[in-house]
C-alpha cells in the first residue's frame, strides 16, 4: 500500500514539473509518462510477480518477454504478457518508489542517502526472515553484492565475482537464506556501516611470545 502511494506521488510530482526523472530531464511528446495512470495494489503485485518470473525464466533482454513467435522466428511465449504490457512494466520499473521522495531518512540519517531510501524495506525483510526462519548453529558471515550499474558513490567493484558491480553488503546466512545484513561503504576509511573500526594500535600483532 505504501509503495503505491509513494509511486503515485512521485510520478505526479514529475508530471507537474514537466520532467521524467530525478535528473530533471524534460518530458517530451514521446515520453512514456504521457500515458501514466495511477497504479494500484493489485497492479503492484502483478509487477512484482513478473519480476520474480524473470528471475526464473531468463531472456537476453526485457523486451524479449513480450515478443511472440513469427513464421521465421519461433520463440517461447510468456504468459506474463496477458497481465501487463511492456510499456507499463517499464514505466513502473523506472518509477516504483519504496520510500517517500519528500522525506526518506526516517531516522536513518547515519546512512548514505541511497541506503536511507531502502532501509525501511530492508529492515522489514530482515525482520520477516528471522520471524519465519529459526537459524541453527552453523551460520556463515560473508560479503555479497546487489547488482547496480548506475552512478553512485556507494557502488563497489569486485573483479571475478558473479556480480562484480553494485552495492556490497555483509550478510549472516544459512543454507542460502540471508538472515541479516548490513550495508558497506567503499573506501579505506569506511567499511561495514554501523561497525566501529578498531584503532590502529589494536590491529598490530604482538611479536614474540606472550609472557605468562
Image (cartoon, rainbow, N blue to C red):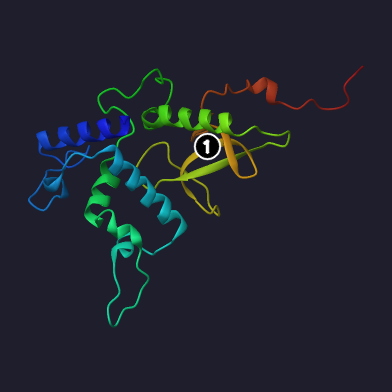
Residue 43 in percent (x, y) is at 28, 44
The image quadrant of residue 135 is: top right
The image quadrant of residue 138 is: top right
Q: Quadrant of the N terminus?
A: top left
Q: Residue furthest bottom?
A: 72
- Is residue 139 or residue 114 the one in the foreground? 139
Q: Quadrant of the C terminus?
A: top right
Q: Is residue 166 visible?
A: yes
Q: Is residue 192 visible?
A: no
Specify whether 205 is left or right of 85: right
- Is residue 172 or residue 150 the one in the foreground? 172
Residue 171 in percent (x, y) is at 58, 36
Residue 22 in percent (x, y) is at 22, 37
**Residue at the image point whose x is 36% and y is 52% from the top:** 50
- Dot 1, crowdedness within 10 Å: few (<14), some or many (≥20)? many
Is label 1 in a helix, a strand or a loop? strand
- Is residue 60 or residue 79 the one in the foreground? 79
Q: Circle 1 sits on which residue?
A: 169
Residue 129 in percent (x, y) is at 55, 33
**Residue at the image point whose x is 28% and y is 82% from the top:** 71
Image height of 193 relative to 107, above or below:
below
**Residue at the image point whose x is 46% and y is 29% from the top:** 124
**Residue at the image point whose x is 25% and y is 57% from the top:** 86
- Is residue 142 or residue 44 the one in the foreground? 44
Amino acid at each position: 500500500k505504501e509503495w503505491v502511494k509513494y509511486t503515485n506521488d512521485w510520478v505526479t510530482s514529475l508530471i507537474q514539473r514537466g520532467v521524467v526523472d530525478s535528473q530533471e530531464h524534460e518530458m517530451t511528446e514521446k515520453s512514456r509518462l504521457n500515458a501514466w495512470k495511477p497504479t494500484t495494489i493489485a497492479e503492484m503485485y502483478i509487477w512484482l510477480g513478473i519480476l520474480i518470473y524473470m528471475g526464473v525464466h531468463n531472456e537476453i533482454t526485457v523486451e524479449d518477454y513480450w515478443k511472440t513467435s513469427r513464421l521465421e522466428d519461433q520463440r517461447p511465449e510468456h504468459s506474463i504478457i496477458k497481465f501487463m504490457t511492456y510499456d507499463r512494466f517499464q514505466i513502473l520499473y523506472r518509477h516504483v518508489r519504496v520510500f517517500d521522495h519528500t522525506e526518506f531518512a526516517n531516522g536513518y540519517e547515519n546512512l548514505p542517502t541511497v541506503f536511507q531510501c531502502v532501509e525501511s524495506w530492508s529492515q522489514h525483510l530482515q525482520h520477516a526472515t528471522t520471524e519465519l526462519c529459526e537459524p541453527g548453529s552453523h551460520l556463515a558471515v560473508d560479503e555479497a553484492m546487489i547488482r547496480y550499474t548506475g552512478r553512485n558513490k556507494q557502488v563497489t567493484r569486485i573483479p571475478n565475482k558473479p556480480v562484480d558491480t553494485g552495492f556490497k553488503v555483509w550478510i549472516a546466512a544459512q543454507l542460502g537464506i540471508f538472515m541479516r545484513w548490513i550495508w558497506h561503504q567503499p573506501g579505506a576509511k569506511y567499511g561495514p556501516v554501523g561497525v566501529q573500526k578498531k584503532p590502529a594500535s589494536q590491529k598490530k600483532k604482538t611479536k614474540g611470545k606472550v609472557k605468562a
